[in-house]
Amino acid sequence: MSWQSVPQYPQYQDPNQQYNYGGGYPPQGGYGGGYPQGPPQGGYPPQGGYPPQGGYPPQGGYPPQGYPPYAQGGAQPYPPPGGYAPQPGFVQPPSDGYGSYDDPEGQPKNFSFDDQSIRRGFIRKVYIILMGQLLVTFGAVALFSFHNGTKNFVHSNRWLFWVALGVLVVTMLAMACCESVRRQTPTNFIFLGIFTVAQSFLLGVSASTYGQTEVLMAVGITAAVCLALTIFAMQTKVDFTMMGGVLLACLVVFMIFGIVAIFFKGKIITLVYASFGALLFSVYLIYDTQLMMGGDHKYSISPEEYIFAALNLYLDIVNIFIYILTIIGASRD
């Protein structure tokens, strides 16, 4: 049997189209019968197998060790420019650096806090501060109204009233005009505490001129009115935050009316003045409540202004109490 009678093996095709040994033998360990006895036609191949078609070595040099061999007719250097082509089902990773994540639907992920949760925490903080202020204030009202020793001491020392009034004006202007005062902790709480004590003292002195029954009635009516107005402000679809200019104009008219009422005293003008004041500050309570709530309202207060929001609500409630007490006192004279 001669070498010429040895059958030639067919061309080996790689199923993954990575290896192509055109006309040559398969790699070692290929077809299970091994190589035929004797050298093939043309002599043994060089060690390492036949070179790819198109010449040996390929243009651009040998591929690095560990890379698959060149495709048939490989004349380009390995690897091809741009790297490997992505396989089916493989998602190309983001190339814009760390910290960015794109949703497959094209919506970027947002890891910031929810605005609604921040607003709810802000409202909770405001009402906690407000409850503390009201406890101090109406505690002072009860002390001045039901304790005769405190009442007599205050009436015999009138200068305390003017000192408290001066402290009240200074602290209120500082918190209203200076952003650093009402935002920096603990400065904001110190000023708010001093303001609350001064306001409580003044309100207690004013309540001490009325009877105990009148004070209790005013406290009960104020609590009911404020609760109803707060629920209304939270439930209504009417946006009261757009009425700031109208309320300011009404407040100016109310102040001028108060100056006139000083010179024209009488029961009727007192009742009209007090009724107008109670109505005005009731609307202000709704206005300030919706400013604090935010949401769908046109205007809202910043969550960092919790001291200012508590101060606004506190002044609204105190003024409502004063004018309701004035109405009750004037109607009983």
Image: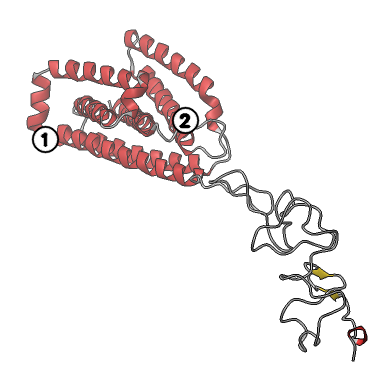
Q: Nearer the viewer, residue 40 or 243?
A: 40
Percent across and percent down for residue 183 are 34, 29
Which quadrant is home to the C terminus? Answer: top left
Q: Which mark is residue 147?
A: 1
Quadrant holding the N terminus: bottom right
Give the colour scheme shown.
Answer: secondary structure
State the residue at coordinates (58%, 36%). 238
Q: Quadrant of residue 126?
A: top left
Asked whether 57 or 229 is in front, the reply is 57
Task: Say whether residue 38 is left or right of residue 162.
Answer: right
- Give the residue type that dot 1 points to: His
- Tell me the element at label 2: helix
Q: Residues within 10 Å of mark 2 (few under 14, many from 20)?
A: some
Q: Residue furthest top?
A: 263
Q: For label 1, count other residues whose C-alpha is less than 10 Å away and answer few (under 14), some (14-19) or many (20+).
A: few
In the image, residue 301 sits, relative to residue 89, either above or below, namely above
- The percent coordinates of residue 153 (x first, y second) are 8, 25
Circle 1 sits in a helix, a strand or a loop, which is it? loop
Q: How many marks?
A: 2
